[in-house]
Image (cartoon, rainbow, N blue to C red):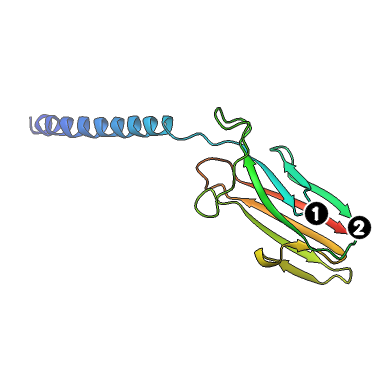
Amino acid sequence: MEIKKRDLRLKPIFAMFVTLALCVVFCVSFAACGSQKKYDISIKVVNTLGEEFIFTPDVDEMSATFEYTGEEVWYYVDSYQMPDHPKYSGIWLEPMQEGYDYISMFGLYTAPDGSTTSLTVENRFTKERGEYTFNVYIPDSSVSWYGRNIYLYITID
């Protein structure tokens, strides 16, 4: 008789845990349905000569060769686009400078003798003969798009 009384006391506790587990599963499912959708992103890199390099979602690398002129030619991310977005698919948007949707660009210059120099915001230009690698990094932490790592290779002959 004693065992049956204990079983009766455990049933409401067990029912409470099952109900709580179902509530958690329901809440998680509901939250996942309401989360914002991420999109693939296209990036437009431009230089001060007016050249455009458009990296669509299926393009991660591009290269170009230019003749040596001794002129500084600056490179920067001009805009981005989300081709599959229902509202913004045909619009090029200006990149944000900080926050979760920040797009950063780094560079590396390799001189003909093999020495290298990092290219920061202050010196992100081509001028001397050699090879330049510009890396555009888009973090996956964005609430709007999937992360990407793209490369623009410039050779100055």
Which residue lies at the image location 88% right of the left edge and 65% below the top edge?
A: 129
Query: Crowdedness of circle 1 by 10 Å Cα count: few (<14), some, many (20+)?
Result: some
Residue at 9% over, 31% down: 5
Please state which amino acid type lies under the numbered disc 2.
Answer: Glu
Query: Quick one: quadrant of the C terminus?
Result: bottom right
Side of 21 relative to 147 (left or right): left
Of marks 1 and 2, the one in the foreground:
2
Q: How many marks can you see?
A: 2
In the rendered image, residue 113, in percent from the top left (x then y), is placed at 88, 72
Can you tell which mark lies on residue 153? 1
Is the C-beta separation of discs 1 and 2 under 8 Å?
A: no
109 and 33: which is toward the camera: 109
Residue 71 lies in what quarter of the image?
A: bottom right
Disc 2 marks which residue?
67
In the image, which disc is placed on residue 33? none
Per the image, label 1 sits on a secondary structure element best described as strand
Classed neighbour count for the residue bearing mark 2: other residues with Cα under 10 Å, few (<14), some (14–19), many (≥20): few
Residue 106 % position (x, y): 68, 60
For image coordinates 42% across by 29% down, the residue present is 33
